[in-house]
Amino acid sequence: MRDHTKLRAFQLADELVLETYRNTARFPKAEQFALTSQIRRAAVSVPSNIVEGCARDTQTDYVRFLIIAHGSAMELQYQITLAQRLGYLGKRSAEALYTSATSVCKVLNALIRSLRKRQYPKPKA
């Protein structure tokens, strides 16, 4: 079993969740069960899928959950821009969250590529 707490992707994703909750706490009450909930679920999904992938037995399952985590981070990026356009997030807060989500995406992409290379090495000519 892999230790998710040692993964940079998990550490960044965990911090992203905390930032997301802090920022969405100020959203309008009318959004509590709509965009606020959706953004929080997407944010929590990222580290949750990393943790679940780490607990899986096979490399294939591990990579699959990392891909799901990446998709959730991408979804969050859109929701952050939407919240800003609706006036729920200030420009500075939105940029900080978006940058954090982008960092998570980049680290996850690198991890996925690395794992795929190990799983499917190119044949030597």
Image (cartoon, helix red, strand yellow):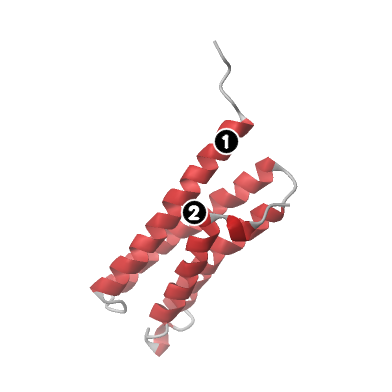
* Residue closest to the eye, 3 or 116: 3
- Looking at this rendering, what residue extends furthest in the top direction? 125
User: Label 1 amino acid?
Assistant: Arg
- Looking at this rendering, what residue extends furthest in the left direction? 91
Quadrant occupied by the C terminus: top right
The answer to whether the residue labelled 1 contacts the one labelled 2, judged by CB atoms less than 8 Å apart, is no
Secondary structure beneath dot 1 equals helix
- Residue found at x 46% / y 84%: 32
Residue 92 shown left or right of residue 79 in the figure? left
State how far apart marks 1 and 2 are (Cα): 17 Å
Quickly name the residue at label 1. Answer: 116
| Whether residue 38 can be seen here | no
Rendered position, 5 above or below 109: below
Secondary structure beneath dot 2 equals helix
Quickly name the residue at label 2. Answer: 71
Residue 74: x and y in percent read: 43, 56
Rendered position, 4 above or below 88: above
Residue 122: x and y in percent read: 56, 22
